[in-house]
Image: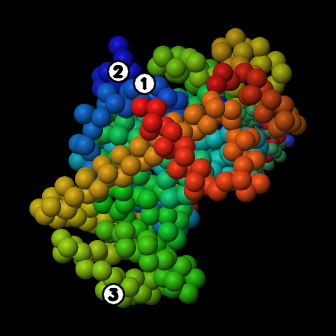
């Protein structure tokens, strides 16, 4: 039986092995992904992002309780940063969710960014697809702790949650425009702390000045105390309301199309690049190219044009 | 491109001594590995399921409370029951030398005691994990 068939049959080991192959960029993983693709597109994907330590994992942990009570199965992809110095990583999001480890309706996968900059790993989208094919109803993607322009999550999630906390410095200045624009729902977590009102007020002001959404959705703000589970129920129902609005208009369809495009472009880019790199390596490697470039015998622009033209001619 | 080594570091049982486990987690991270740390007070079931979902190469158990003879073999057994016997299990902590043969017989690959050097632990993983 093929790996993909085993995954569709509910084989957990097969699924996690494929995730490993995807993450390690083993070429054969693509065969399984091809076979699984027709079985994807059913899950609802929720992204959660925000500064380090704001409580993203704790919120996910508590949301899972509610989804599970409603009988929904859940997949979680939790991304933490790879150390640029050692290439290693400590993936700590799972600690907060580990009480769900024996629940068969919950599958948690920790990923390291492995040098990717957008707040996710390169493998995230494909791994979400595997969970989708596994039949997970809801898939939650937790990004690395960010606060700047790491907004890749919008290409992956239907609903994006941005988590803020009181005392993040002077005000929302720390949170750049990018991350405000991607939020469909906002959370002020640790709201029992001083300054929660101020964060909420500042945020409301920034949101009022923000772009009007074509589907009329106005991002709500939820106040939560995640360790106590407070405000999580409201947050989950906020997700459902957003989902409804997406489904009523054309937005959901548009999001799927945008996501399909982003994924396709990424795959195309990877494939094309690896083909050219293979060609260069087969044709005698980098030495002569780098000699030519550093000695200024040619320029990168002409060289790229030449290599592309040669490749096209060969076909 | 070689595969990245993935390790699960876990503390089974009610033992709250987590310094050693954290020292190990950091050392493995600094050696370029991906380390999933599950925290303290884990049941063997939780540990085995996490190891499978994360498709790690090896599980490192840490125990200083004396419950290793009971808990370490359980993790090995559950992994085996779930068809994941290729995931290696090893460990460390306060473990009397006399207990080591029994643990090894139960499928725990190696035990590192207090004072063990992290270099030796890293070397052990690199030599025993097939990636
Ligand atoms: C620090 C300490 C504490 C701290 C723990 C702080 C923390 N968050 O970790 C505090 C004060 C909280 C504490 C409390 C207790 N402690 Co205490 N504690 C110690 C002490 C002094 C040092 C442990 C330590 O941190 N060592 C430093 C780390 C780096 O070393 P390590 O954990 O051994 O790890 C090394 C190796 O073992 C190995 N290793 C460890 N784990 C792993 C995992 C893997 C995968 C690998 C490869 C290797 C490996 O590699 C590491 C590096 O060399 C030991 C005595 C001792 N000398 O070991 C007692 C000791 C462990 N504690 C003991 C006891 C009894 C207790 C208490 C029950 C006391 C009480 N009555 O309240 C409580 C229980 C706490 C709990 N909830 O479980 C006893 C345990 C006796 C036993 N096993 O039968 C000991 C042995 C003291 C003694 N001689 O009686 N303790
Ligand atoms: N006081 C308080 N602490 C909280 C709350 N939510 C989470 N925490 C604590 O904040 C710390 C970080 O929580 P996490 O859930 O790990 O935060 P995170 O955003 O996932 O962190 P990273 O993934 O490391 O960016 C933990 O110690 C939590 O217990 C809350 O509502 N109130
Ligand atoms: Mg987290």
Please name the residue that numbered disc 1 is placed on: A14
Tell me the chain of label 1: A
Residue B124 rendering spot, x and y as whole percentages: 78, 26
**Would you say A262 lies left or right of A52 here?**
left
Q: Provide the secondary structure element on which disc 3 rests.
A: helix
**Would you say A258 lies left or right of A88 here?**
left
Please name the residue that numbered disc 3 is placed on: A209
Q: Are marks 3 and 2 in contact (CB under 8 Å)?
A: no
Residue B3 appears in which quarter of the rendering?
top right
Rendered position, B71 above or below A113: above
* Residue density around tag 2, few if under 14, some if 14–19, many if 20 or more, within 10 Å: some
Residue B80 rendering spot, x and y as whole percentages: 53, 16
Q: Give the mark toward the camera: 3 or 2.
A: 3
Q: Are marks 1 and 2 in contact (CB under 8 Å)?
A: yes
Q: Provide the secondary structure element on which disc 1 rests.
A: helix
Rendered position, A252 above or below A165: above
Q: Which mark is residue A189?
A: none
The residue lying furthest to the top in this view is B105
Dots 3 and 2 on the same chain: yes
Tell me the chain of label 2: A
Dots 1 and 2 on the same chain: yes
Q: Residue at x 38, y 27 (%)?
A: A32
Q: Quadrant of the N terminus of chain A?
A: top left
């Amino acid at each position: 039986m093929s790996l993909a068939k085993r995954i569709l049959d509910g084989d957990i080991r097969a699924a996690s092995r494929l995730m490993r192959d995807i993450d390690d960029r083993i070429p054969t993983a693509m065969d399984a992904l091809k076979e699984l693709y027709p079985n994807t597109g059913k899950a609802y994907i929720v992204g959660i992002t925000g500064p380090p330590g704001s409580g993203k994992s704790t919120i996910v942990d508590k949301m899972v309780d509610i989804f599970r009570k409603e009988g929904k199965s859940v997949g979680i992809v939790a991304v933490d940063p790879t150390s640029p110095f050692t290439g290693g990583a400590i993936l700590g999001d799972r600690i907060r969710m580990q009480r769900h480890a024996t629940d068969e309706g919950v599958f948690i996968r920790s990923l390291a960014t492995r040098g990717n900059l957008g707040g996710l790993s390169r493998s995230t989208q494909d791994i979400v697809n595997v969970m989708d094919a596994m039949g997970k109803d809801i898939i939650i993607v937790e990004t690395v702790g960010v606060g700047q322009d790491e907004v890749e999550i919008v290409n992956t999630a239907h609903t994006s949650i941005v988590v803020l906390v009181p005392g993040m410095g002077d005000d929302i200045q720390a949170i750049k425009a990018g991350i405000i624009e991607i939020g469909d729902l906002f959370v002020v977590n640790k709201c029992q702390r001083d300054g929660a009102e101020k964060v909420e007020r500042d945020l409301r002001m920034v949101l009022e000045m923000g772009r009007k959404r074509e589907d009329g959705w106005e991002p709500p703000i939820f106040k939560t105390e995640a360790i106590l589970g407070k405000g999580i129920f409201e947050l989950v129902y906020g997700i459902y309301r957003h989902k409804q609005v997406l489904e009523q208009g054309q937005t959901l369809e548009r999001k799927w199309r945008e996501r399909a495009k982003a994924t396709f472009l990424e795959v195309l880019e990877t494939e094309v690049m690896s083909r050219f790199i293979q060609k260069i390596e087969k044709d005698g490697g980098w030495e002569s190219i780098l000699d030519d470039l550093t000695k200024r015998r040619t320029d990168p622009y002409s060289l790229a044009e030449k290599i592309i033209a040669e490749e096209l001619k060969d076909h | 491109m070689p595969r990245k080594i993935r390790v699960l570091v876990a503390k089974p049982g009610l033992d709250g001594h987590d310094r050693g486990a954290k020292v190990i987690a950091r050392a493995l991270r600094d050696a370029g590995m991906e380390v999933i740390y599950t925290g303290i007070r884990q049941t063997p079931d939780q540990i085995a399921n996490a190891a499978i979902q994360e498709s790690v190469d090896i599980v490192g158990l840490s125990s200083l409370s004396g419950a290793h003879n009971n808990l370490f073999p359980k993790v090995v057994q559950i992994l085996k029951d779930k068809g994941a016997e290729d995931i290696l299990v090893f460990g460390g902590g306060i473990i009397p030398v006399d207990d080591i043969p029994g643990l090894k017989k139960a499928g725990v690959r190696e035990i590192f005691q207090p004072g063990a050097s992290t270099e030796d632990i890293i070397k052990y993983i690199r030599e025993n994990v097939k990636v």
